[in-house]
Image (spheres, rainbow, N blue to C red):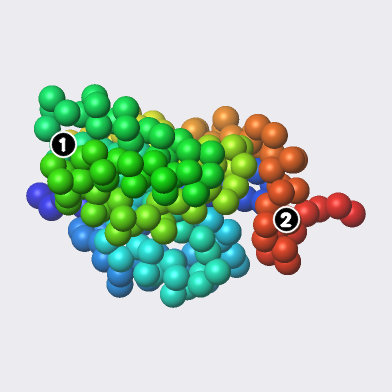
């Protein structure tokens, strides 16, 4: 038996509705795989992506930049926190998190950078590699500071796609194995059809958010005002 992973691309269209853009099966990930995924999306009509929230999968940022060079990339804060805590001693985790929260919950990028410096002063010697990871990924971890609270909530974490995956797993876990990749994709497609029946309404306060996006991304976010 061979284990495969299914990668789903979930987007918010310009009308504020969730939309599953694609499902892809692969045994491994990397720049070549993600380049194929993004090229497929482009060929099927996805003309532009304003902001991509990802969990720092290997090669994914490079593929996005190659196919959609104007796209802003936001790495999932929650994934960064989880990965950091793996290397923080259990006895320090509570205190470390207390000092880390002011970094990613800061009101501005300038304040976040100041809080990060304070975090490094306190924990840098003990957890040098953890703080190096935050510094190394800082530009992609902090894209959301450009936006207001409504947009930040949408893009600072990949929780939306993870919620979708949890619902899909309720269906796939009942199967011990699949005869083919297509059999798996068909089952997920049927599950997605049922899940998407609840995606009838746009996101909360989308009218206001869409107007702000049109200002932030002139000539790219087109509003239907006719």
Q: Residue 125: image x %, image y %?
A: 15, 46
Numbered mark located on residue 185 in the image: none
Q: Which is nearer the eye, 105 or 16?
A: 105
Q: Position of residue 23 (x, y in %)?
A: 40, 53
Asked if residue 159 is positioned above or below residue 180 in the image, the reply reads: above
Pick whichever of labels 2 and 1 is earlier in the sequence.
1
Residue 222, quarter of picture? bottom right
* Depth check, front residue: 109 or 78: 109
Task: Tell me if mark 1 has few (under 14), some (14-19) or many (20+) residues whose alpha carbon lies within 10 angstroms of its own.
Answer: some
Residue drawn at x 68%, y 52% is: 213
Q: Which residue is mark 1?
A: 88
Name the residue tied to disc 2: 214
Q: Where residue 29 sits in the image (x, y, percent)?
A: 25, 61
Of helix, strand and loop, which one carries label 1? loop
Q: Is residue 43 above or below residue 162?
A: below
Task: Tell which of 101 and 72 is nearer to you.
Answer: 101
Residue furthest right in the image: 226
Residue 96's x, y, as percent?
25, 32
User: As drawn, is 212 to the left or to the right of 52?
Assistant: right
Residue in view at x 34 percent, y 47 percent: 117
Q: Secondary structure at mark 2?
A: helix
């Amino acid at each position: 038996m061979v284990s495969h992973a299914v990668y789903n691309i979930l987007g918010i269209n310009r009308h504020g509705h969730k939309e599953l853009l694609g499902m892809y099966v692969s045994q491994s990930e990397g720049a070549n795989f993600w380049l194929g995924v993004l090229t497929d999306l482009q060929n099927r009509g996805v003309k532009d992506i304003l902001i991509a929230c990802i969990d720092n999968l290997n090669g994914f940022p490079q593929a996005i930049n190659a196919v959609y060079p104007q796209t802003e990339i936001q790495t999932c804060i929650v994934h960064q926190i989880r990965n950091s805590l793996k290397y923080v001693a259990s006895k320090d985790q509570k205190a470390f998190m207390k000092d880390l929260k002011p970094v990613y919950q800061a009101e501005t990028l300038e304040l976040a950078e100041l809080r990060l410096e304070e975090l490094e002063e306190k924990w840098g010697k003990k957890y040098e590699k953890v703080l190096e990871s935050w510094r190394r990924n800082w530009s992609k971890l902090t894209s959301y500071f450009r936006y207001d609270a409504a947009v930040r909530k949408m893009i600072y974490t990949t929780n939306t796609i993870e919620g979708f995956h949890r619902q899909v797993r309720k269906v796939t876990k009942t199967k011990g194995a699949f005869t083919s990749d297509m059999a798996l994709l068909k089952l997920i497609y049927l599950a997605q059809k049922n899940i998407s029946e609840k995606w009838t309404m746009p996101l909360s306060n989308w009218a206001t958010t869409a107007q702000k996006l049109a200002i932030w991304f002139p000539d790219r976010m087109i509003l239907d005002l006719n």
